[in-house]
Image (spheres, rainbow, N blue to C red):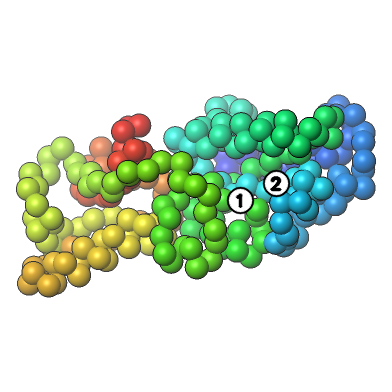
Amino acid sequence: MEHRNLHVTLIVIFILCLFVGNAGCAEEKDNALAEEGLLRLSKPFTGDFDQMAKDRLIRVMMPYSKTFYFFDGAKPRGASYELVKLFEEFLNKKLKTGTLRLHTVIIPTAREDLISSVRDGKGDIAVGNLTITEARLKDVDFSSASATGVNEILVSHKKSSELKSIFDLAGKKIFARKSSSYYESLVKLNEVLRSAKKKEVIIAEADDHLEDEDLLEMINAGIIEFMVIDSHKGEFW
């Protein structure tokens, strides 16, 4: 838990460096906008992009992940982190901001809180390899999909018995976060199994603080036997 506290502290320091002026960070310019941007970090805001550009701040909600967002020492890394920084560069070039740059500030957020944080104005964008579902579209809008043709695949421990069809999953315990699209898929699978007069799978709710990579490590260690993961993410591992 201590390492997470350290990361949050580093991020707070980084945020202050972006907006406080040139006390070792950047030349002091437009402090009124800077103070407004800092205020918006903690206050709910549901304005449009024009206001974000005026404040020079986009709050990005992002969960920790060994693939998409993590720290290498004090340096943030990961696929999602790099994409957000490329997005920041793109916006600054497009808006021709010059020295008054627009900044993206990444706020570490538990995965189960990503959608609600954007909906409630605690963040402007959520980045977390989220699958577009009908339920989620009721709360937020999505950008164009960054990956298409993605399938959800079953991952099992190497000593598990061979599975030849979905009906072989009857009665098996499969781990999934309740906030994930995997959980929704398993609920639908149980509908199919019930209609075929088969036992339902046992959906074991994984802690929402566990990322897919954490569950993969638990599979590898033999702690759990089955999980579901997006195919493109599985290819990383």
| Left/right of residue 191 with respect to residue 33 in the rendered view | left
User: Callout 1, which amino acid?
Assistant: Ile
Q: Which residue lies at the image location 20% right of the left edge and 67% below the top edge? A: 190
Q: Which residue lies at the image location 68% right of the left edge and 42% below the top edge? A: 105
| Left/right of residue 165 with respect to residue 144 in the rendered view | left
Mark 2–mark 1 distance (CA, rounded to whole Å): 8 Å
Residue corresponding to mark 2: 58
Q: Which residue lies at the image location 52% right of the left edge and 37% below the top edge? A: 80
Mark 2 neighbour density, 10 Å: few (under 14) some (14–19) many (20 or more): many
Q: Identify the disc placed on residue 125.
A: 1
Vertical placement of residue 60 versus 121, above or below: above
User: Callout 2, which amino acid?
Assistant: Ile
For marks 2 and 1 on the same chain, the one whose residue lies earlier in the sequence:
2
**Place of residue 72 in the rendered image (x, y in percent of width and height, measured from the top left):** 55, 27
Q: Secondary structure at mark 2?
A: strand
Vertical placement of residue 217 versus 98, above or below: below
Vertical placement of residue 183 versus 2, above or below: below
Quadrant location of residue 104? top right
**Place of residue 227 in the rendered image (x, y in percent of width and height, measured from the top left):** 26, 49
Image quadrant where one finds the C terminus? top left
Quadrant location of residue 103? top right
Q: Are marks 2 and 1 in contact (CB under 8 Å)?
A: yes
Q: Which residue lies at the image location 72% right of the left edge and 34% below the top edge? A: 94
